[in-house]
């Protein structure tokens, strides 16, 4: 089973933890409790292939953003989160996207998904879908609108990212052979 490290990044209070917990544990976190760092693990089946995910839910607070560089270096895939009810949080996504490309070497095939949260709060919406679609197309990245509360499109985000990571980091057939050889005994 292949293992992937996913880093969830975004401004404070946009719903990173709610998104992560909904996907990993299938529960909704009702109350906001600022995260410093939380790691979740889960085996998932996407397209009939099993993968093991380590999802790192990061802090959005300004005092912890210096840790982002460490997280980005170790990440295989990234979920960039903003709130559909906070237009300012979208600017943070662009800044994080640029930071990822700078740290990872500007490679355009870095697995990234852009996620707008709080889709269920339609009356409070500040970011329009066409604006996001335009940005996502300009960046060449997939974009999803989600609601962790209602469990709308949450799995789609992570399944897309798993597919991207599999393509970017193909299985090493030599490693599989070596692993199988370890269990072989000659008498």
Image (cartoon, grey):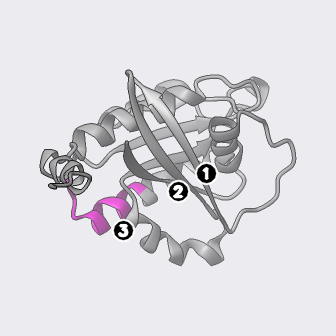
Along the horizontal axis of the image, is 44 left or right of 49?
right
Observer-nearest of 155 and 112: 155
The numbered mark, 1 or 3, whose residue comes first in the sequence reads 3
Task: Say which residue label 3 marks.
Answer: 73
- Start-end of magenta stretch: 97-107
Q: Is residue 11 above or below residue 164?
A: below
Q: Secondary structure at mark 3?
A: helix
Tell me which secondary structure the magenta stretch mostly adopts. Answer: helix
Q: Specify whether residue 139 is in view.
A: no
Pointer 3: residues within 10 angstroms few (<14), some, or many (20+)? few
Q: Position of residue 121 (x, y in %)?
A: 76, 28
The numbered mark, 2 or 3, whose residue comes first in the sequence reads 3
Q: Is residue 88 above or below residue 151?
A: below
| Residue in the picture at 52% in, 75% down | 67
Q: Quadrant of residue 107?
A: bottom left
Residue 103 magenta: yes
- Say how many tags the image has: 3
Q: Secondary structure at mark 2?
A: helix
Along the horizontal axis of the image, is 24 left or right of 133?
right
| Residue in the picture at 76% in, 62% down | 34
Task: Determine which of the numbered discs, if any, sits on residue 92 in the image.
Answer: 2
Pointer 1: residues within 10 angstroms few (<14), some, or many (20+)? some
Observer-nearest of 47 and 1: 1
Task: Say which residue label 1 marks.
Answer: 88
Q: Quadrant of residue 11?
A: bottom right
| Residue in the picture at 22% in, 48% down | 180
Q: Specify whether residue 144 is in view.
A: yes
Residue 24 magenta: no
In which quadrant of the rendered image does the N terminus lie? top left
Find out whether the residues at labels 2 and 1 contact each other: C-beta distance under 8 Å: yes
State how far apart marks 2 and 3 are (Cα). Answer: 19 Å
């Amino acid at each position: 089973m292949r293992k992937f490290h996913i880093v969830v990044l975004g401004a404070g209070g946009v719903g990173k933890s709610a998104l992560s917990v909904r996907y990993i544990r299938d529960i909704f976190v009702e109350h906001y409790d600022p995260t410093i760092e939380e790691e979740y693990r889960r085996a998932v089946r996407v397209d009939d292939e099993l993968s093991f995910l380590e999802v790192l839910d990061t802090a959005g607070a300004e005092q912890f953003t210096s840790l982002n560089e460490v997280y980005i270096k170790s990440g295989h895939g990234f979920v960039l989160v903003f709130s559909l009810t906070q237009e300012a949080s979208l600017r943070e996504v662009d800044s994080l996207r640029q930071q990822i490309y700078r740290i990872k070497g500007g490679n355009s095939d870095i697995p990234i998904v852009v996620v707008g949260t709080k889709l269920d709060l339609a009356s409070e919406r500040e970011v329009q879908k066409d604006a996001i679609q335009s940005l996502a197309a300009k960046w060449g990245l997939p974009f999803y609108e989600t609601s962790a509360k209602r469990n709308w499109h949450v799995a789609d985000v992570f399944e897309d990212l798993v597919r991207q990571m599999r393509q970017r980091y193909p299985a090493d057939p030599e490693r599989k052979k070596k692993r199988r050889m370890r269990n072989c005994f000659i008498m």
